[in-house]
Amino acid sequence: MRRISVFGATGSIGQNTLDLIAREPERYAVVALTGSSNVARLAEDAIRLRAEVAVTADESRLGELRDALAGTGIEAAAGQGALEEAADRPTDWCMSAIVGAAGLVPGLRALRHGGTLALANKESLVCAGPLLMAEARAHGARVLPVDSEHSAVFQALADNDPAAVEKIVITASGGGLRDWPLERLATATPDEAGSHPNWDMGTRITIDSASMFNKAMELIETHEYFGTPPGGIEAVIHPQSIVHALVQFRDGALMAHLGAPDMRHAIGYALHWPERRDLPVERVDLAALGRLDFAAPDPARYPALALARGVIAGGGLRGAAFNAAKEAALDLFIARAIAFTDMAGCVETTLDEMERSGCLDAATITLDMVLDTDREARARTRVP
């Protein structure tokens, strides 16, 4: 049996991962499940899948988790230290789906087992891509992408020589505000921005989809994971969310990955790799679909994309600052302290301030440098 842990088990990626694991319980031994505030679901899943330990990031909920697990023999723990201890438990495969920069340290520690890290935590590559990939190499571990776009690129590349790649194209739905008039965007509420036409995701990533900050993060991820230069990465609007990415080779050929908008595609691929096994996902009927549309993103509507290209070009600690400022700006929007259209400006201001202070340049980065940059960027991101 394969030993498996799922970090971020109560979120949408985690729940889809557990759905696949529960369909073949004889194949997997669940080591650790972690979550945050949804302690009832965390305990229910831990019992159902007979996990060794369940961890909530919220230390104030430890008593509630212990009560829910009483008599089951499953350990209950809470807090950052408990998350790290859970990541230290040996596994063959670990899902990294904690939202935000909080997922970086558990992912790094899980790599030390030399197994597979299924990476759904965008922030790990954006904040510390070179650090994460170096850790994987040092321990003979493998990082498999779980973002639908990067999983699609990984699959489209197959056994092709990376040197033959001319361009990587990742697609974006455009989010829930895609068809709003530009002048109306400033009035969008968190509820309106948090509704997605195609994907069933958490509130924060759904708002990031509407602002295209998620796609900005994915541009940086593409560079860090595949080594693609900034000029070789493109994002296009694709409303149907059927084509997840395309790889263009130097002979002009385009290899595309198509599939219904269901994260179990990418999760299942990473879970079963290098095999392809049956998955309970909808099959695409091209004749019924009828058409696939693509359009270039409007820079005025999606300023986050230009910010991401600057991060890629500058390197160093700019990814860590970008992500932290993005998360802090999103917090301000959700709290209704700033408008939807203010988020990119907040991030840009923070990056500009930190550029002037000269703290973003670094030939090599360490975990402490990343965490320090994260804290400083959050502190600097404020209401204009």
Image: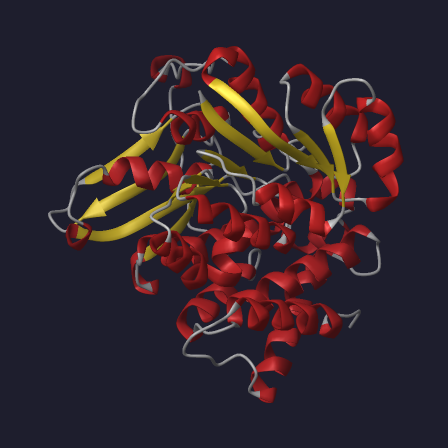
**Quarter-wise, where is residue 116 in the image?**
top left
Residue 299 or residue 321, whichever sits in front: 321
Across and down, in percent, residue 187 comes to 77, 52
Residue 192 or residue 326, whichever sits in front: 326
**Quarter-wise, where is residue 270 in the image?**
top left
List the single residue furthest toward the bottom.
357
Q: Is residue 302 above or below residue 353?
A: above
Across and down, in percent, residue 112 comes to 45, 49
At x 49%, y 35%, the residue is: 91
The N terminus: image quadrant: top left
At x 67%, y 15%, the residue is: 48
Residue 259 or residue 94, whichever sits in front: 94
**Can I make out residue 272 in this image?**
yes
**Can I make out residue 180 in this image?**
no
Q: Is residue 367 above or below residue 90?
A: below
At x 67%, y 31%, the residue is: 53
260 to the left or right of 179? left
Across and down, in percent, residue 142 comes to 36, 44
List the single residue furthest toward the left.
251
247 to the left or right of 370? left
Q: Is residue 372 above or below residue 103?
A: below
At x 67%, y 45%, the residue is: 83
Judging from the image, the colouring scheme is secondary structure
Q: Is residue 189 above or below residue 321?
A: above
